[in-house]
Every structure is written in structure tokens, then in C-alpha cells.
Image (cartoon, helix red, strand yellow):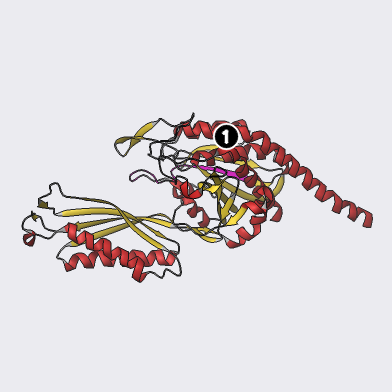
Amino acid sequence: MKSGFIALLTFVPMLAMAQLKELDKNVASIKDSVISWRRYLHQHPELSNREYKTGAYIAARLKALGLEVHTGVGKTGVVALLKGGRPGPVVALRADMDALPVYERVELPFKSVDSAEYLGQQVPVMHACGHDSHVAILLGTASVLASMKKDIPGTVKFIFQPAEEGAPGDEEGGAPLMIKEGVMDNPKVDAIFGLHINSQTPIGTVKYKSGAEMASSDWFVVKVKGKQSHGSQPWNGIDPVVVAAQIIQGFQTIVSRQAELTKAPVVITVGKIHSGVRSNIIPEELVMEGTIRTLDSKMQEQVHEKMKLTATKIAEASGAAAEISIDTKTKVTYNDPALVKQMLPSIEAAIGGDNVKEAEWTTGAEDFSFYGDKAPAFFFFLGGLPAGKDPAKAAPHHTPDFYIDDSRLDAGVKIFCQLVFDYGKKR
């Protein structure tokens, strides 16, 4: 018994080491393909809820791996299942697919020159947020895991999601629609992981935060109705432009004087104002639009109430009327602390502990947040900043000069694979 027990102890680590070597070999073998896929997708971007060719491209490669593939999920999304050779949990991995109405200014051999219709206008289209990288990483992950199917504990669900940037107009889309259509069920997901490439994080490194990591995103519209008058006789009218200016100032005092900023940050931004047709006419109406970012769900509710009160009362004080509507686009992206603690060693094992750093929260937003309502979730950032480049000089996301170094996308593949194997074993 004793000698058999000793043999078992020595055999298990050897088996794990052999599996690790196989994983490293398979990730290395797929690296060039991952880069090639990313560059093809970068050159052929598609807007939210219009990712038809992107979805077909993904589905074809997943079917070639022998996976169970479902298309048209959440309009254009693709979901694939890989059933491992060992019993275990259901782990979901998610990548978003959509591009943005942005003109690409970076000169690359695979630069996008595509355009498309967006809200009635013809616009340039660019992967200005790195979703092409996410798709390529997840395709690489599927390829590696399919080749190691017999060793996988449980089931892997690959989620390729459209419209993370927001569905156009009044359309449904993104994570909420995929969840509505059952992506987190059949089979029920036990844990979900996601990543986002970051242009200002050094290549080959990961940043994460336990708990609240990314802000909720609300879009608001304020309509102010006054009374039209000649521009030379403001006393005969009620100027909605002046009222709107006061409302904007009032919104900023919510941030600076009413929000408990030691608890979590709050941002209120008015990004669009439309009113009037001539410089010498006081208009009757004004419409302004903007965004709210919070990192605490209770504060999110409080800010909504305070904004409604501020807008309506300031308007009343001037004899005008104001209506405000608020549409929640995403919730706070919350990383389950227990899951982070459990799986952080796996990320460190994949790329080295020195390359994994805890970060501060960010006021950027992600609809990955909705998946956290259905299962414990862990979302992290993968570096795409070229080695030696100053992060402060790197172009931010959603801009024409956005650029990432794609030579280490294999780090994302290795991390995803490590998470699948280790989560299954720990469960």
C-alpha cells in the first residue's frame, strides 16, 4: 500500500507536467494563426448587430474543429460547445465581435478602409477597441482545447458576442439579448471569464481588479421646453439654452457636492446639445444627451434620482419644463472576489506572476457585466502596448490612432486554456 501510494504521488505531478508541456506546445503552434485571424478581422470590420460575415468566419472555423456550433444567437452571435473527456463544470469564455464607426488613421498593411450605414449615414468602420483581437484569441483557445479534448474536465462554452458597443437605434443586442436567448443555460454555466485588450497596458501583461472593476454606463436625454422669442427680447420668452446651462452646472454639483466620492467615483458628461435654427431666435426647445458612470449600484440609483430632481426643479424655477429619461446600457462590471482569489494563480502560472498586476477601477464600461448576474464572473485586461512605449503616449480606445501590438495574443490563449483546466480541477 505504501509503495503504491508513493507511486501515485509521483505519477500525478508527472501527468500534470506532461499536460502543461502539451498545452505550451499547442499554444505555440497556433500563435501565427491567431495573429493572421486578427489581422483579417481587422481589415474586415462590421458594426454592432451587423457582424454577418464575422459570424460566418467564426462559425466555419469552429465547425472545422468538430464543435457543436449555434449561429444567429443574439442576432449575429455564435456559440460553440466543447464537451471534455472528463467530468466537470461548465466554463464559459466570451469574446465580443463588433467594430466602431471610426476612421482608421494608422497606416497598416491590414488597415480597414471599409464603410457601412449607421443610423442613416455612411460611416467609416474600424476595430478601434480591439474586439478583433478578442475573437482571434478565443478562436485560438477553441483550437487548442479541441486538440486536448480528452483531458478537459467538463464542458467549455465559447461565446462570440455581437453589439458590445451597443445596438443601433432601438434594436436589442449585446450581452442582454444573448442572455435572454439562453446563452448562460443549456447547459448552465458555472463560471464565465472574459478579457479585453488594452492599448495602454504593456504587452504580455495582465491587469485585474477584484470586486467592482468597470463602471456602469447610463445614457440620458434631457428635453427642455421654454418659450420662443426674438433674440433681442428675451423677456418675452423662456430661454431653454440658459436653463440647460444651469442644469448642466447642477449635474456637476451632484458629482462634486452630493456624491460620496470616497466610496466610489461618479462621472456625468453631457456630450451632445441641439437647439435652435438661427442666431437671433430664442428657441422653444432644447435636447441634450450624455452619459453617467458609477462604480456602485446604490450610487447609480441615487444619481439617477438626483439628476431627475435637479433637471425638473431648475427648469421650473425659470418657468420652463424639463423631461429626463435614463437608459442603463451596462451594469457595474463586478469580478466575483472568491473566483478571483481561486483563479488568479492560474493566470500567474500562464504568463508569470511578475506580469500580473492589480489595477484601479476604471470608468470605462462593458456589457460583460450582465453575465455576472447568471454566474460568478472574472474579467481582466491583456496588454497590447508595444514594448518600450510610453503608456501616456499611446492612443486610447475608440480613436482613429488606436493601435495594439498583436505579437503576444498567444498570452490570452494560454490564460484562457489554463483557466479552463484549473477551474475544472479545482471544482
Other-residue count near label 1 (Cα within 10 Å), few / some / many at <14 / 14–19 / ≥20: many
- Image quarter of the C terminus: bottom right
- Image quarter of the N terminus: bottom right
Q: Give the percent coordinates (x, y) of residue 311.
A: 25, 64
**What residue would you read off at disc 1?**
35
* In the foreground, 26 or 339: 26
Residue at screen point 33% across, 46% down:
170
Furthest residue toward top = 109
Quadrant of residue 48 within the rendered picture: top left
Residue 161 belongs to the span the image colors magenta: yes
Q: Secondary structure at mark 1?
A: helix
Residue at screen point 62% across, 43% down:
411
**Residue range corresponding to the magenta coloring:** 156-170
Q: Give the percent coordinates (x, y) of residue 53.
A: 46, 31
As shown in the figure, which amino acid type bears the numbered disc 1?
Ile
Residue at screen point 49% across, 54% down:
369
Relative to 71, say whether 240 is above or below: below
Q: Give the percent coordinates (x, y) of residue 390.
A: 51, 47
Q: Give the percent coordinates (x, y) of residue 101.
A: 37, 39
| Magenta portion: prevailing SS class | loop
* In the foreground, 216 or 4: 216
Determine whether, in the image, residue 120 is placed left or right of residue 345. Answer: left
Determine whether, in the image, residue 398 is placed left or right of residue 137. Answer: left
